[in-house]
Image (cartoon, rainbow, N blue to C red):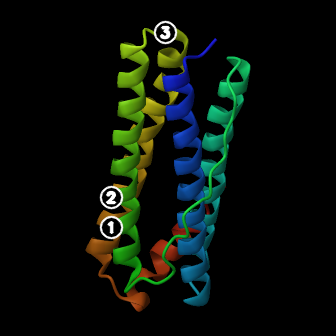
């Protein structure tokens, strides 16, 4: 059985993961309207991945005998000044999510909830990858120049994501 403290924290994280999905879907829509289909595809797949993260936690709460409590998901912003600004926000958001995951690990440790601690290790590792990917794209945008005409190569590369 999962403690009420841990259950509540995990339910908050389900909401945060779903917000991440909404944010990335909004970013994808921004790139769709800018005719940058590769960026749009990458972010759309990222949104789907975030939904998967939410469901992983959702399923875990149920498996541990907890109750899933879904809250309203905050609406994300819809406009950015440039591709660079989008990926600055992606990188900062992933850093924020890393902090959230670390906080969940701290709660699990305080609660002496070894099962949740173990489950969260997957997310700890995942966040290293998430931050690395966002930072790599941001750095490539900076190298190429944050100008639409300069970003077609990167747009093409991002469109290859499966």
User: Which tag, 3 or 1, sits closer to the chain's start?
Assistant: 1
Residue 4 x/y as whole percent: 55, 23
Q: What element carries label 3?
A: helix
Q: In this view, does 85 lie to the left or right of 78?
A: left
Location of the C terminus by quadrant is: bottom right
Label 1, on which residue?
A: 88
Location of the N terminus by quadrant is: top right
Foreground residue, 80 or 11?
A: 11
Q: In this view, does 143 lie to the left or right of 86?
A: left
User: Which tag, 3 or 2, sits closer to the chain's start?
Assistant: 2
Label 3, on which residue?
A: 114
**Number of marks in picture:** 3
- Determine contact: label 1, label 2, CB under 8 Å: yes
User: Is residue 131 shown above or below 86?
Assistant: above
Q: What element carries label 2?
A: helix
Q: Which of marks 3 and 2 is in front?
A: 3
Label 2, on which residue?
A: 92
Q: Which residue is drawn at 36% across and 32% down?
A: 103
Q: Which residue is drawn at 47% across and 17% down?
A: 117
Q: Which residue is drawn at 61% across and 68% down?
A: 25
Label 3, label 1: how far apart the Cα atoms are: 35 Å
Residue 110 x/y as whole percent: 36, 15
Label 3, label 2: how far apart the Cα atoms are: 29 Å
User: Is residue 123 shown above or below 71?
Assistant: above
Callout 1: few (<14), some (14-19), or many (20+) C-alpha neighbours within 10 Å?
Answer: some
Q: Which of marks 3 and 1 is in front?
A: 3
Q: Is mark 1 on a helix, strand or loop?
A: helix
Callout 3: few (<14), some (14-19), or many (20+) C-alpha neighbours within 10 Å?
Answer: few
Callout 2: few (<14), some (14-19), or many (20+) C-alpha neighbours within 10 Å?
Answer: some
Write down the quadrant of residue 159 in the picture.
bottom right
């Amino acid at each position: 059985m999962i403690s009420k403290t841990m259950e509540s924290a995990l339910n908050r994280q389900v909401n945060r993961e779903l917000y991440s999905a909404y944010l990335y879907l909004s970013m994808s829509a921004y790139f769709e309207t800018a005719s940058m289909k590769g960026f749009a595809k990458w972010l759309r797949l990222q949104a789907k991945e975030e939904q998967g993260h939410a469901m992983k936690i959702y399923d875990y709460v149920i498996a541990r005998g907890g109750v899933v409590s879904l809250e309203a998901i905050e609406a994300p912003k819809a406009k950015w000044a440039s591709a660079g600004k989008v990926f600055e926000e992606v990188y900062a958001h992933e850093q924020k999510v890393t902090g959230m995951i670390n906080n969940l690990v701290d709660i699990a440790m305080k609660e002496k909830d070894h099962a949740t601690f173990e489950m969260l290790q997957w997310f700890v590792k995942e966040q290293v990858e998430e931050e690395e990917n966002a930072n790599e794209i941001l750095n490539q945008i900076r190298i190429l120049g944050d100008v639409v005409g300069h970003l077609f190569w990167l747009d093409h590369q991002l469109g290859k994501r499966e």
